[in-house]
């Protein structure tokens, strides 16, 4: 009997980029908003996480719109991690936009326009729309293909049923193409939007659950719909004001604004067609007026989201002045800013202020302070990062790496994890040991040793400004 050779298969699901905060799953709080010592990727910073949890609760209840929060602390104390945890805790529907203060000075638009677009990205609109849909289980799909290629378009019939009735629908070319794109087959439960013709695959009927011995984990089973095939349903779209701005800036037409209930499909196409540049104030005014009408009629609901600005000390006095005014708007989101600066100059002025933020703007902020991590916290974080980066490390190596993190910085210790794993692989070891940590510690300098080296050999560098007696 000839041997059957199985083709080699690679699992591509694990190929992903591991980021600095990819291990963050939330704020790690219990139902009483008390911070667990280590949960959802968050370690330590219990008071800061509790304060962030209160902010998240207020966001979810819509009670903090138009306010601002400052995350202030030393470098490497988890400010961005807390902001990421807030984003994960808030949920899918609440918009969360991130922006670095330095980005504003590299965009091809004015600073205030970039800030306004960031604000609009963080304001969600939940739009309710009544539409007629056809929902049923697919009994049979018959497609009649022409005998001669190109002679005529394909036609067919679709048989749908509910628990009460069964109907046959005639199909055109576009509907046949849509059914093929969604890979609809007999036994699937589908929904068809009568206005747009969009087909949504809801799942597979429970009556067909025994058709196959094995099915993928993504297979979802649903009950066969009951009642009439044609129903009126309330569809809810959740989008941001910026998405509506982009659509209407491309098509300056009142009918687009009137029909932008259907922008879920066309809106994202507009977003991917390129940079819109600055959006005219008249367009935004029309959109705000239309959204206000929808609110009055009960068709729409405003969802104030969160705008997170990192490196807020990089903003200049003009940006702070704009933020002061923007926070007083009726539809302002929750502004969360972060900085690691102490008392420093406000950009664009000669004045010095705490965190490089003007006093009048600083007075509006709820300030959350982060503290340096303890040795135990560093050890727990390193354990989480080793697990995230799939690195197996011995207990002695973790103790040494924790000590390095205490003497230098947490970021430096985290950077050594993957480097030590490569050093271990080089010597054909399976578990990262102390010698691998020592090896990469000698190869890569931390800030203290690099500064010490510079001070020692400063005279050999160009433009030396440190005298021999200093």
Image (tube, rainbow, N blue to C red):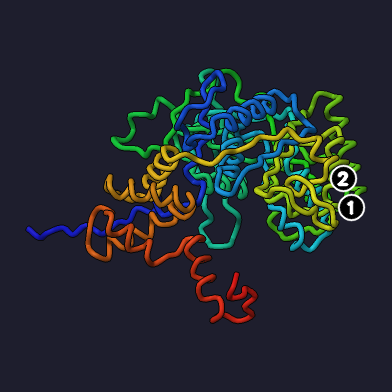
Query: Residue 392 at x, y = what percent?
Result: 30, 49
**Residue at coordinates 71% horizontally, 30% vertically from top-left?**
131
Query: Residue 424 at x, y = what percent?
Result: 28, 60
Q: Distance between the residues labelled 2 and 1?
A: 7 Å
- Return the residue nearer the eye: 441 or 117: 441
Query: Residue 367 at x, y = what percent?
Result: 70, 35
Q: Quadrant of the C terminus?
A: bottom right
Q: Which residue in the structure is indicated by mark 1?
A: 280
Q: Which residue in the structure is indicated by mark 2?
A: 284
In the rendered structure, the answer to whether residue 60 lies left or right of residue 29 reads: right
User: Is residue 58 positioned above or below 6 on the image?
Assistant: above
Query: Residue 301 at x, y = what percent?
Result: 77, 28
Callout 1 secondary element: loop
- Return the residue nearer the eye: 92 or 394: 394
In the rendered structure, the answer to whether residue 123 lies left or right of residue 466 reads: right
**Residue at coordinates 83% horizontally, 27% vertically from top-left?**
295
Q: Residues within 10 Å of mark 1 (few under 14, many from 20)?
A: few
Callout 2 secondary element: helix
Q: Is residue 359 visible?
A: yes
User: Is residue 108 positioned above or below 461 on the image?
Assistant: above
**Residue at coordinates 38% horizontally, 54% vertically from top-left?**
417
Contact, mark 2 vs mark 1 (Cβ under 8 Å):
yes
In the rendered structure, the answer to whether residue 409 lies left or right of residue 153 reads: left
Q: Residue furthest left?
A: 1
């Amino acid at each position: 009997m000839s041997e059957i050779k199985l083709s080699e298969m690679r699992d591509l699901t694990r190929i992903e980029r591991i980021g600095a905060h990819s291990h963050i799953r939330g704020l790690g709080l219990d139902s009483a908003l008390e911070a667990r010592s280590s949960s959802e990727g968050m370690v330590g910073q219990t008071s800061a996480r509790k304060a962030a949890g209160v902010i998240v609760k207020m966001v979810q209840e819509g009670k903090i719109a138009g306010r601002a929060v400052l995350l202030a602390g030393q470098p490497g104390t988890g400010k961005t991690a807390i902001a990421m945890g807030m984003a994960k805790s808030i949920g899918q529907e609440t918009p969360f936009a991130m922006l670095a203060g330095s980005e504003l000075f590299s965009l091809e638009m004015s600073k205030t326009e970039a800030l306004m677009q960031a604000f609009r990205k963080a304001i969600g609109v939940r739009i309710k729309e009544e539409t007629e849909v056809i929902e049923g289980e697919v009994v049979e799909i018959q497609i009649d293909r022409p005998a001669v290629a190109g002679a005529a378009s394909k036609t067919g019939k679709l048989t749908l049923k509910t628990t009460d009735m069964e109907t046959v629908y005639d199909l055109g070319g576009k509907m046949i193409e849509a059914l093929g794109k969604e890979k609809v087959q007999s036994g699937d439960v589908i929904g068809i939007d009568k206005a747009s013709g969009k087909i949504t695959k809801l799942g597979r009927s429970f009556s067909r659950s025994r058709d196959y011995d094995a099915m993928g984990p993504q297979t979802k089973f649903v009950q066969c719909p009951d009642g009439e095939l044609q129903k009126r349903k309330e569809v809810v779209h959740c989008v941001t004001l910026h998405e509506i701005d982009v659509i209407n800036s491309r098509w300056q037409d009142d009918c687009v604004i009137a029909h932008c209930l259907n922008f879920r499909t066309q809106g994202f196409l507009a977003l991917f067609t390129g940079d819109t540049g600055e959006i005219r104030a008249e367009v935004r005014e029309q959109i705000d007026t239309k959204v206000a009408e929808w609110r009055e009629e009960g068709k729409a609901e405003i969802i104030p989201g969160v705008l997170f600005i990192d490196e807020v000390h990089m903003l200049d006095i003009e940006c702070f002045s704009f933020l002061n005014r923007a926070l007083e708007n009726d539809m302002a989101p929750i502004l969360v800013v972060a900085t690691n600066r102490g008392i420093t100059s406000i950009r664009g002025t000669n004045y010095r202020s705490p965190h490089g933020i003007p006093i009048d703007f600083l007075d509006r902020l709820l300030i959350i302070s982060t503290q340096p991590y303890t040795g135990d916290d560093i050890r727990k974080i390193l354990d989480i990062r080793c697990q995230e980066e799939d690195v197996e490390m011995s207990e002695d190596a973790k103790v040494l790496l924790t000590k390095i993190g205490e003497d230098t910085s947490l970021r430096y210790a985290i950077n050594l994890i993957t480097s030590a794993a490569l050093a271990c692989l080089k010597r054909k070891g399976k578990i990262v040991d102390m010698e691998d940590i020592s090896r990469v510690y000698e190869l890569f300098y931390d800030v203290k040793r690099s500064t010490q080296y510079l001070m020692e050999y400063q005279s050999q560098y160009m433009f030396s400004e440190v005298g021999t007696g200093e």
